[in-house]
Image (cartoon, grey):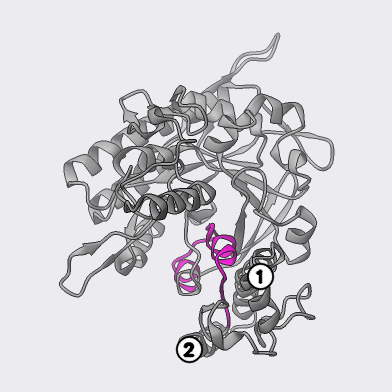
Amino acid sequence: MRIGELTTPHGVIHTPAYVTVGTKATVKGLTPEIVKSIGAEVVLANTYHLYLQPGEKLIKSQGGFGAFMGWHGPTMTDSGGFQAFSLGAALGKNISKLVKENKDGKNQFGEILMPEETESTKAQKASQSSQTGHGSHGSRNQDIPEEAMVPAKIDAGGVMFRSIIDGSAHYFTPEKSIQIQHDLGADIIVAFDECTSPHEPRHYQQEAMDRTHRWAKTCLKYHHDSEATIIGSDGQEYKQALYAVVQGGRDEELRKESATILSTMNYEHMNFVSGEKPKVQNYGFDGYCIGGSFAKEDMSTAVTWVNQILPKDKPRHLLGIGEPEDIFMAIEQGCDTFDCVLPTRNGRTGTLFTSYGKINIMNAKYRDDTSKIDEYFICPMLTSYSRAYLSHLFHAKEMMGPILASVHNLYFLIELTKRIRQAILEGRYEEFKKEFLERYKKD
């Protein structure tokens, strides 16, 4: 458990920090001004989606995705590696970032909205299903190209996948991923990796991990051989920070092996200066992501294995977690940042985080509930709104409902993380955690 500051070309991230997800260079339904006003310090965008639309070259011409969307603080991009998972091994299987164990010990798949099935197309498919009498597998949105339903193919060099927009074929290599991220212009970028399902056999987990390590080495070389830079808030040129992704599934030996290899991986770059003897510079990764799909019950253990090995002087980012209990776990195990689409995704469906647990604002009991959305986490933008008002907005299908719910949820998780940081600073972390979780689990 630790606190710190990450200095980027576009500002400081005070850690631990919750990273706001802006998948397509937008935090769904929220302006950058709103995102900033509720305490967000960093926004993460999705390489895969921005590559397909509007394209990294257009975004580069606009000064990077931060400037493109009007966000002037620190930024991150992922590698597109998760699409190797969701468009490959997980296609059509409803496998999520986290899976749960049944009472009989068997794994139960959680639901995930795959890249080829966005929330809007999912709603259209459901409507079509109800009209035709078919179940969820009985119909398919006609707007989605048939070719896009073909699973991605992974080979030694990269991943071939089909566009969810027009069905065209694309091939991501480590070099391609880094080139796209150079053009997207984030302060922090991520090496290309292969995420696997926790249900894949060990031999495949090993194969995918080894492939991830080879790709990481290629990314490191390509990044430092490139002359790509970004312009910081001070007008100076900076090299983007490059993170590696630790993989290895649920296997302790593989996880530790991955953390060890990546933490010691470096690239000897020859720096040629006219008239001078070439200088050899050793470059390692600037930070590390902990990736993969976990069983929720053993995620803490896997994170512990990894963080015991990763360098203590470099940042660690846990990919894809957004429940309050998981935030406490991540911070306790030495993670500095973490991200998830959960706050805005839940907000759009009427699920709100509160100090007494999550609530569904569509439930009848909230129709005449004139209390504040939450008495302990009062978002400064929402002080005038009651639960009854939000309930009305959702029942009336007013667009303001999902917007206000998303603002509240994002504020809740950002503010929770800030309060945890302050509690650590003041030496009262255990007291704060006990008080919060006892109240959170009451509802």
- Which is nearer the eye, 69 or 305? 69
Q: Nearer the viewer, mark 1 or mark 2?
A: 1
Query: Mark 1 and mark 2: span between their CA atoms?
Result: 26 Å
Residue bearing the label numbered 1: 396
Q: Position of residue 198 (x, y in %)?
A: 27, 53
Q: Position of residue 116 (x, y in %)?
A: 45, 40
Q: Is residue 232 above or below residue 440?
A: above
Q: Amino acid at mark 2?
A: Asp
- Which is nearer the eye, 67 or 211? 67
Secondary element under disc 2, as helix, strand or loop, is: loop
Q: Is residue 344 magenta?
A: yes
Secondary element under disc 1, as helix, strand or loop, is: loop
Q: Is residue 206 magenta?
A: no
Q: Residue furthest top?
A: 275
Q: Is residue 35 above or below residue 262?
A: below
Q: Position of residue 385 (x, y in %)?
A: 75, 80
Tell me what residue is drawn at x 51 percent, y 24 percent.
Answer: 176
Q: Amino acid at mark 1?
A: Ala
**Circle 1 Cα neighbour tier, 10 Å, few/some/many (<14 / 14–19 / ≥20):** few
Tell me what residue is drawn at x 71 percent, y 83 percent.
Answer: 386
Q: Is residue 299 above or below residue 147?
A: below
Stretch of the chain drawn in magenta = 328-354
- Note whether residue 65 is visible: yes
Residue bearing the label numbered 2: 443
